[in-house]
Image (tube, rainbow, N blue to C red):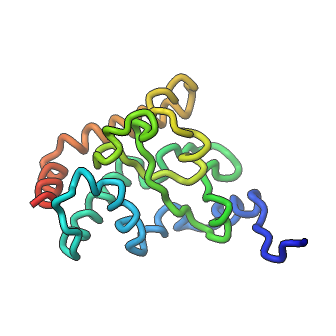
Amino acid sequence: MINIMAKIPLKEHRQMLEKNLKVYTQDFDSDRLIKTMIPHIRKDFNKVRFNVSKKQILKKIILLIFETQDNRPFFHVEGTELPLCWNTPDDWKYNYIRYEWGHLPSKNQNPESKNVIENVGLYSARCNQHIQAGMDIKELMIYGGILAQRISNVLTNRRKLFDTPQWKELIKELRS
């Protein structure tokens, strides 16, 4: 049987991404990232009722995390003809990155830290499923080169963010 709803080829998806000026930020135009983050932090924030006010705080937190990644997917690297970050095949129809929440210490290897807000990052599906693929973020450093440099830069930015009064105040507000 022929699938008349066949997915577009990966190269075409990557070309669509390349042409979109808002490719890395368009997913922030909705509340999808807030809704998808809540299950990842629910256990650590089990007493929090995610009403409109709390979701606004969460949105600020998400934007700060994204800034530590230079407003790109966690493993984004430059220097190729087409983007090396892309969506899951079901989302190849989109011309922007639909982010997934990845866990820096892998939730498979570190189930105790999977609900900690400081342990999540914004990944493309390709980054989450093919690059990290269940490994701890530090295990990826062995690959060296541009990927190791990117990881190092983002981790440094995150450490700085988590030490700021702004971050600490937002977490306090989220918990209150």
Quadrant location of the N terminus? bottom right
- Residue drawn where x is 46% and y is 64% of the image: 25
- Residue drawn where x is 27% and y is 37% of the image: 159
Closer to us: 143 or 112: 112
* Farthest-out residue, left: 176
Closer to us: 32 or 29: 32
Quadrant location of the C terminus? bottom left
- Residue drawn where x is 25% and y is 39% of the image: 160
Q: Is residue 136 above or below residue 39?
A: above
Closer to us: 115 or 8: 115
Q: Position of residue 53 (x, y in %)?
A: 18, 73
Q: Is residue 26 left or right of residue 131?
A: left
Q: Is residue 148 left or right of residue 49?
A: right
Q: Is residue 121 above or below residue 39?
A: above
Closer to us: 45 or 156: 45
Q: Is residue 22 above or below residue 69?
A: below
Q: Position of residue 164 (x, y in %)?
A: 17, 45
- Residue drawn where x is 16% and y is 52% of the image: 166
